[in-house]
């Protein structure tokens, strides 16, 4: 079954309104928790049972993350939603904001209840004006209807949320860079520890979750952790939004069960466009290593299966490449992206992403040297593990993946100063 | 001096900025700096001057250097004049394999300006941007607050026509 969790309003006219959300049982999970005084521990236990893992890319177990919060301690705490969707290929959170913003608000409120926070911020990337407007309007509707504010449903629980707009920086999707950005600074990641659960926004204990993660919570509370888990498989619970882009007939966001075979997802997307063959798939956003098409046809869409194939589920952004895509050209574009988006704080990433991009540029444009392939591999390896945040890894993993499977195309480019693949390439 | 600076921010912008300031704790006014920079940039026709950044610093009780840091870190702030319509073209991987190259070529031909440049009549600026998170609608562009998706040359012509 599809569209049962984050997209459960999608079949309605104007799915983003409060009226639409209420018609599918919206805000009933929050009401139940507050009127029946369900202890936070019980909800966190349900979230753990659900095996919900962070949908932003890192895949960290959500229930476990919430349990790190010192929720009994006095003082201000925050729940922060990460809607800074920027991993190339990923466009799912945008649709949650546009089509089901109330479910995200309810999820934030429930998370706030579980971690002891009365205030939430949703960090929305600056370019997302329409999604921001929808979300902000939903906040107003929720306040007016009494789903946000003081003493919700007659309980002692107060909760309000606000949106914060970014300004164009991929790095702010990294949770501590995001906190810096809300604090009105450059988005440069913080050293960890201390972790946000101890020292987060404005120095207060903070939990940061992805949009899809939080939007999944109301349904998990309503139907139970076991129900969600059974939509996927052990350790890979639930449904997941997959953003499919690239050379298919019907690109789009598909909410399907974890563990669905890739071949079925490809079928849902109408198969390959214009009769070209499937060459390769970048299965979890641009940072995830590429997997050859033949191998991908045996993979199921979940954390463990994609990891076993040598890549990662990441943000669930499935980029489909056909056989006219030159892999040198593809990696050159990605390497340029990471150079542009490195925040410049750590030398290995700041300099290394520049090296990767320059080397890829010269191979792509017919000036590659014989030693360049080994040099790419070495520079990528030298970045990994030597930076504050994961952007260094994110820049290096695609290099390793492309070289592992398509080294011959790189060699061909260096030897012949042109692409190995046929029409459509440069 | 600081009062003079603040006056560069017009009344409507002040109202807008104040709404953002109200979202954050009372002692965390600087959290509104990104919103304030966007608002004064819009007020000024799409780009920031040093005087405007100084005015924001003054308005939010921040050191100028911290405002400059923010204004130069994020890609949506402009530091030189732009055309009436800033056309942001995504050329990242999903758009690339769906034909963003042709979109770039068509825009450059049609407007007679290269990426990064502004047309002589100051109507359009072309800007190459990184992934805008609308990958299933590739190739796509952003103009102002709007995303235009699933583009081809014909659709581009229509969009440009409507903007004139």
Image: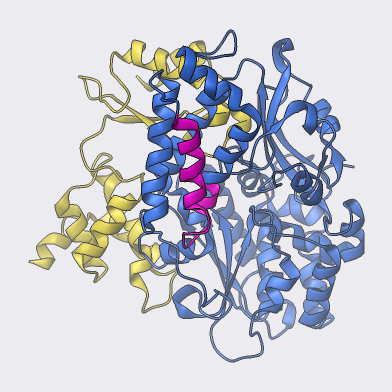
Which shade of the palette goes to chain A? Answer: blue
**Relative to B156, is A143 on the left or the right?**
right
Give the residue displayed 44% in from the left and 53% down from the top: A166
Image colour for chain B is yellow
Residue A393 on the magenta span? yes
Identify the image quadrant of the N terminus of chain B.
bottom left
Total number of numbered labels?
0
- Residue drawn at point x = 57 percent, y = 21 percent: A409
- Residue A253, position in %: x, y? 71, 37
Where, by quadrant of the figure, is residue A327 drawn? top right
* Horizontal and vertical percent position of residue A23: 81, 53
Closer to the camera in the image, B137 or A412: A412
Q: Between A226 and A279, which is closer to the camera in this rendering?
A: A279
Quadrant including the C terminus of chain B = top left
Q: Which residues are magenta?
A: A371-395
Q: Residue furthest left?
A: B1
Please give the name of the residue rendered at 36% of the width and 50% of the height, measured from the top-left corner.
Answer: B74
Q: Main secondary structure of the magenta part?
A: helix
Outermost residue on the top side: it is: A423
Left or right? Give the position of A67 relative to A123: right
Color style of the picture: by chain
Name the residue nearer the viewer: A130 or A40: A40
* Magenta residue check for B53: no
């Amino acid at each position: 079954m599809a569209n049962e969790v984050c997209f459960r309003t999608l079949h309605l006219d104007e799915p983003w309104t409060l009226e639409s959300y209420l018609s599918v049982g919206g805000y009933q999970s929050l009401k139940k928790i507050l009127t029946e005084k369900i202890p936070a521990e019980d909800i966190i236990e349900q979230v753990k049972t659900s095996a919900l893992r962070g949908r932003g890319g890192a895949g960290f177990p959500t229930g476990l993350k919430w349990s790190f919060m010192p929720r009994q301690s006095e003082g201000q705490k925050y729940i922060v939603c990460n809607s800074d969707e920027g991993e190339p290929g990923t466009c799912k959170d945008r649709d949650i904001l546009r089509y089901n913003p109330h479910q995200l608000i309810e999820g934030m409120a429930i998370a706030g209840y579980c971690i002891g926070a009365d205030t939430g911020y949703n960090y929305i990337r600056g370019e997302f004006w329409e999604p921001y407007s929808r979300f902000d309007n939903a906040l107003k509707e929720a306040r007016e209807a009494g789903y946000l504010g003081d003493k919700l449903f007659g309980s002692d629980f107060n909760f309000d949320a606000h949106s914060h707009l970014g300004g164009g920086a991929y790095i702010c999707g990294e949770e501590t860079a995001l906190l810096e950005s809300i604090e009105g600074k450059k988005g440069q990641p913080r050293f960890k520890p201390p972790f946000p659960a101890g020292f987060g926004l404005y120095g207060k204990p903070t939990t940061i979750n992805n949009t899809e993660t939080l939007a999944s919570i109301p349904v998990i509370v309503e139907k139970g952790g076991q129900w969600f888990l059974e939509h996927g498989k052990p350790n890979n619970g639930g449904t997941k939004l997959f953003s499919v882009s690239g050379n298919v007939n019907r690109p789009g966001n598909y909410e399907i069960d974890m563990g669905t075979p890739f071949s079925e997802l490809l079928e849902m997307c109408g198969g390959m466009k214009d009769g070209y063959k499937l060459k390769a798939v970048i299965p979890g956003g641009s940072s995830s290593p590429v997997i050859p098409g033949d191998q991908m046809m045996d993979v199921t869409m979940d954390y463990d299966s994609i990891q076993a194939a040598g890549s990662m589920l990441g943000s669930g952004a499935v980029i489909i490449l056909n056989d006219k895509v030159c892999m040198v050209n593809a990696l050159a574009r990605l390497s340029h992206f990471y150079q542009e988006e490195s925040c410049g704080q750590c030398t290995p990433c700041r300099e290394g992403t520049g090296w990767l991009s320059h080397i890829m540029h010269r191979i792509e444009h017919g000036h590659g040297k014989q030693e360049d392939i080994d040099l790419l591999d070495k520079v990528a390896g030298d970045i990994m593990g030597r930076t504050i945040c994961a952007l260094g890894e994110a820049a290096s993993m695609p290099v390793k993946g492309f070289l592992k499977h398509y080294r011959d195309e790189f060699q061909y480019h260096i030897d012949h100063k042109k692409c190995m693949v046929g029409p459509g390439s440069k | 001096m600081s009062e003079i600076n603040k006056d560069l921010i017009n009344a409507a912008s002040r109202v807008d900025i104040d709404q953002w300031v109200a979202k954050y704790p009372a002692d965390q006014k600087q959290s509104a700096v990104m919103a304030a920079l966007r608002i004064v940039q819009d007020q000024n026709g799409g780009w920031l001057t040093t005087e405007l950044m100084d005015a924001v610093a003054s308005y939010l009780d921040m050191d100028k250097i911290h405002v400059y840091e923010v204004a130069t870190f994020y890609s949506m702030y402009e530091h030189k004049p732009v055309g009436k319509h800033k056309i942001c073209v995504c050329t990242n991987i999903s758009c690339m394999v769906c034909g963003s190259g042709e979109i770039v070529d068509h825009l450059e031909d049609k407007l007679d300006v290269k990426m990064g440049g502004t047309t002589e009549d100051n109507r359009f600026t072309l800007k190459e941007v990184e992934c805008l998170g609308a990958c299933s609608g590739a190739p796509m562009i952003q103009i102002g607050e709007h995303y235009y998706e699933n583009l081809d040359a014909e659709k581009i012509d229509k969009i440009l026509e409507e903007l004139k």
